Image (spheres, rainbow, N blue to C red):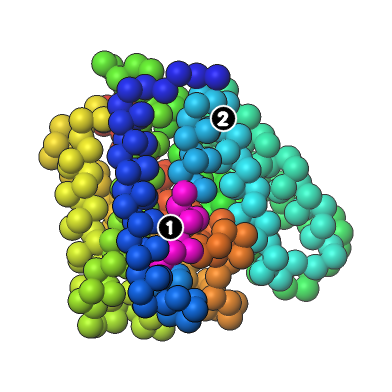
Amino acid sequence: MTTMHPDLITLLAGIGGLLVVASLIGYGLQRRYSPRGDHDVIENLNARIRAWWIMVVLMALAFLGGKSGVVILFAFASFSALREFITLASARRADHWALATAFFVVVPVQYALIWSEYYGVYSIFIPVYAFLLLPIIATLRGDSRDFLVRIAEVQWALMICVFCVSHVPALLSLEIPGFEGRNVLLIAFLIVVVQLSDVLQYVWGKLCGRRKIAPRLSPSKTVEGFLGGVVSATAIGAGLAWMTPFGVWAAAGLALMIALLGFCGGLVMSAIKRDRGIKDWGHLIEGHGGFIDRLDSVVFAAPIFFHVVRYGWSLS
């Protein structure tokens, strides 16, 4: 087990305090306005708070486990998210070997490369080697019906659920002068900003949302909610500069980038759900849908955040 950095302990204690306050508020609202559990907004809020408790505890345990704990946690998240995605794909019997390769070869190899810090390989393993290998395997089965669609769906699933998500633990491999041994705080910064942006967009939207920003894709998202959430998340990111290698203005700029990319990722994944006629990717996490529903904002933000930090602050 690894000893947590004092800054990470401070951050987790702050998040824990916020969750305690949120839990008390949710309990009070339920007692007053939804004693029978018939107020949808309040019940949804409390379900989200309970899910957040679970996710924060899991993240804390992963951080305590050091690099191995973080890599294992996100490998499990990628595997589960890939499973959710593939259940909606147009796979046929001829794709079974290609899918088995994706789950039991590509996922573990990608995360083994992340753990080993082989940047030159894990940065191209999926978009080059896996993209070329999977259609070859599927072709050998001789089924050409909807071949392009079937292969493209698997490739897109790997990019979203594995390649992009794996760049979160990849942050541990960056060598930043004066920041040695604190890289886990980069993961905390990314996740806190992108998830709080989501939450604050929801809150601002409920408080003063009027104009729908993408009614056909995500009816609950509003212009007011988007602006309020992004501005709030940017301010929070600036306030968290103390736990990063960035200055206040750089932290604010990166938080703005993360919030905008997270919003775009959410819209893209919502478009896929609408295309497939579903509301949530899964039901494993109460109040939050499936793994992809929680990762949709992270997947677009993680690889770009990783490379901006790598080329802007890292020596690796």
The CA span between labels 1 and 2 is 24 Å
6 horizontally vs 76: left or right = left
The image shows residue 251 at horizontal and vertical percentages of 20, 39
Is residue 289 depicted above or below 72 in this figure?
Answer: below
Residue 153 drawn above or below residue 315 = below
What type is the residue that disc 1 sits on? Ile
Tags 1 and 2 touching, CB below 8 Å: no
Confirm whether residue 148 shows in the render: no
User: To which quarter of the image does residue 48 belong?
Assistant: bottom left
Indicate the quadrant where residue 225 lies: bottom left
Left or right: 126 as drawn, with respect to 296: right
Residue 93 highlighted magenta (yes or no): no
Pointer 2 local density, CA inside 10 Å: few below 14, some 14–19, many at least 20: many
Which residue is the site of mark 2? 69
Q: At 35% from the left edge and 57% from the top edge, which residue is drawn?
A: 24
- Dot 1 or dot 2: first in sequence order is 1
- Helix, strand or loop for disc 2: helix
Residue lying at 26% horizontally and 16% vertically, measured from the top left: 178
How crowded pointer 1 is (Cα within 10 Å; few <14, some 14-19, many 20+) is rated as many
Q: Which residue position is annotated with label 1?
A: 49
The amino acid type, in three-letter code, at marker 2 is: Gly
Asked if 174 appears above or below 208 in the picture, the reply is: above
Which corner quadrant of the image does residue 305 belong to?
top left
Quadrant containing the N terminus is top right
Q: Which residues are magenta?
A: 45-53
Name which residue lies at 28% across and 67% down.
203
Asked whether 85 or 99 is in front, the reply is 85
